[in-house]
Image (cartoon, rainbow, N blue to C red):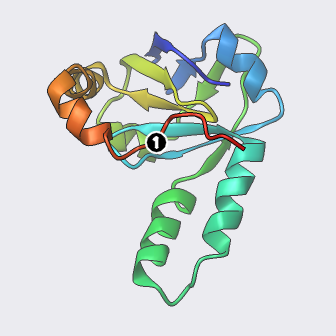
Amino acid sequence: MFLGQFQHNLDDKGRLMIPARFRELLEGGAFITQGFDKCLMVMTEAYFKQVYERIEAMNLADPTARMLRRLILSNAYPVEVDKVGRILVPQNLRAFLEITSGELVLAGQGEYFEVWTPGIWGEQMALLHDTEANNARFSTLDLSKKDS
């Protein structure tokens, strides 16, 4: 599982250092794509295939399904961790983040991890540090254990 937050550099050739904890999870292959917010998503091959199958099962006549397909699939690239522990972030995804090099934040999300610029990640964290807003925001989500 991808958990925790890490800060790593993107070099001027577009290579991003991956935390050691995450590298072993990517050994079976991985994909990088544009995220739903101003971030990137890196998924294991197995999880990406699950997402792909869900997208493929959607009604092609639905304009929202087509937009989701474009967002995820047209921006998806296979990535491999090199012997130093880096992945190559494609140019169009670097352009989406509006960076050429520098520090990035890698944030575990369970089945995948996200890649953020520090400024936008800071904005996300500020939102999540507002306990009153969180109480309202998350009140309808049931995280309690269900009795079987």
Q: Which amino acid does label 1 sit on?
A: Asp
For residue 33, above or below residue 113? below
Task: Locate residue 2: give its quadrant.
Answer: top right
Task: Locate residue 129: give its quadrant.
Answer: top left
Q: 52 or 139, which lies in front?
A: 139
The residue identified by callout 1 is 142
Expressed as whole percent of the image width and height from the top left, the position of residue 34 reads 46, 47
Expressed as whole percent of the image width and height from the top left, the position of residue 86 reads 63, 19
Q: What residue sits 53% from the left and 62% below the top?
A: 74
Q: What residue sits 74% from the left and 28% below the top?
A: 26
Q: 124 or 42, which lies in front?
A: 124
For residue 5, above or below residue 116? above
Numbered marks: total = 1
Q: In which quarter of the image is the N terminus?
A: top right
> How would you rate the neighbour count of disc 1 (Cα within 10 Å): few for under 14, some for 14-19, many for 20 or more?
few
Task: Locate residue 130: give its quadrant.
Answer: top left
Expressed as whole percent of the image width and height from the top left, the position of residue 48 reads 68, 49
Q: Can the viewer see residue 12 in this picture?
A: no
**Tag 1's secondary structure?**
loop
Q: What residue sits 47% from the left and 66% below the top?
A: 68
